[in-house]
Amino acid sequence: MRIQLSISRLSIIMLMLSALIACSETATNGVDDLSQGLDPGSGTEQGSGSNQGGSSEEGTSSTNEGEGSSGQPLGEDEFGVVQHFPANSAVNIALVSKVSITFNADVLANSFNDNLIRVTNSGSPVAGRLVRVNDRLFEFHADALLEPSTEFTVSISDEVMSADGVSNEAYQWQFTTAADVYDTAQDVIDLCMNERDIAMLDSVNATRIVARTCGDDFQEAVGKLRWHCDLRTSSIAHSEDMRDNNFFDHGGSDGSRPSNRVERAGYSWRSVGENIAAGYFSVESVMQDWIDSPGHCRNLMSPLFEEFGFGYVEGNANSAYPNYWTQNFASPRNF
């Protein structure tokens, strides 16, 4: 099942799989898998807070890899890397990440240049610059976001020398970036994203960068979204509410709207949207049906949104569906 919110349209269509009318409504809305529940509407709210946000409905509109690791095993009189970020073999590294390298002694200034620390992708150098933070700490700043889902190699030449003339032993390690989480920070990935979350944001961003038609409306390609932990919190809360109270709707069991739930999670919003679904077993399948449904598609393609969160929960013995999915889209209020 899925649902969306829209400020300008009023329509909630609930698909009851045992009802004949649901079948016709399902087909009308381009959803032909009757083993799954879908809400073809969508929910979007705009405003600057709960008192000014209009509510209308068109339905209704990890792994912790971010820490650095110790470097080379060094003897008492040896010179080399003692810590670096990302860690060796780290995965799900943010695309905005800087590579940092800390040596165990001051680096001789005239022994050092940009070619002595290199970041490469399949042997090709990554465009960027080396920044000397202090005499022991150096950072590589890429000129653009790192490529998603890509293994990078960091190589340090044996020509790097300490201030007292001791040479470094050549050293390298690899790390792998996350899928397309746009400019989501590493601490956010580590704090509140799991593999399904990363896959969902990757799919949403892949959808947004391609112009498409949502129903009769042509939608231009729009910018990617970053993850926000508060929007994940509000999404999980609504998925749990639908499961625990055995309903499927944008309205919460306590009468809350998406904007209310986003605020409860601590997010101050300018615009809010929500898609919901139930009974799907992969990110790919639920996303395809959301894309095929005009109202949900409009939420996915809306230029009003900058940030995103998602909440998936398994069903229980008393729930109508085996799982529940909620997407929250939002832009923060500008104070």
Image (cartoon, grey):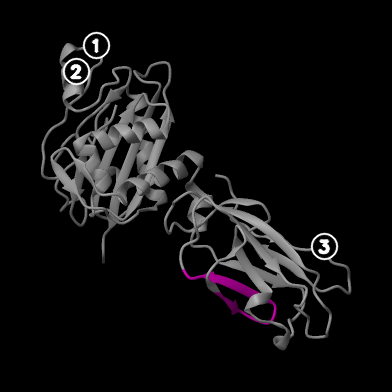
Q: Are marks 2 and 3 in contact (CB under 8 Å)?
A: no
Q: Position of residue 233 (x, y in %)?
A: 39, 43
Label number found at residue 73: 3
Q: Is residue 61 visible?
A: no
Q: Note whether 160 is above or below 334 in the view shown.
A: below
- Disc 2 to disc 3, how far (Cα)? 65 Å
Q: Which residues are magenta?
A: 129-143
In-front residue for pair 178/137: 178
Q: Residue flagged by tag 1: what amino acid is it?
A: Ser
Q: Is residue 216 visible?
A: yes
Q: Are marks 2 and 1 in contact (CB under 8 Å)?
A: yes
Outermost residue, right side: 76
Q: Position of residue 161 (x, y in %)?
A: 78, 80
- Disc 3 to disc 1, how far (Cα)? 65 Å
Left or right of residue 258: residue 88? right
Most frequent secondary structure within the magenta stretch: strand
What quarter of the picture does the N terminus occupy? top left
Q: Are marks 3 and 1 in contact (CB under 8 Å)?
A: no
Location of mark 1 (residue): 18
Q: Note whether 239 is above or below 122 in the view shown.
A: above
The stretch drawn in magenta includes residue 205: no
Left or right of residue 29: residue 311? right
Label number found at residue 184: none
SS under mark 2: helix
Location of mark 2 (residue): 22
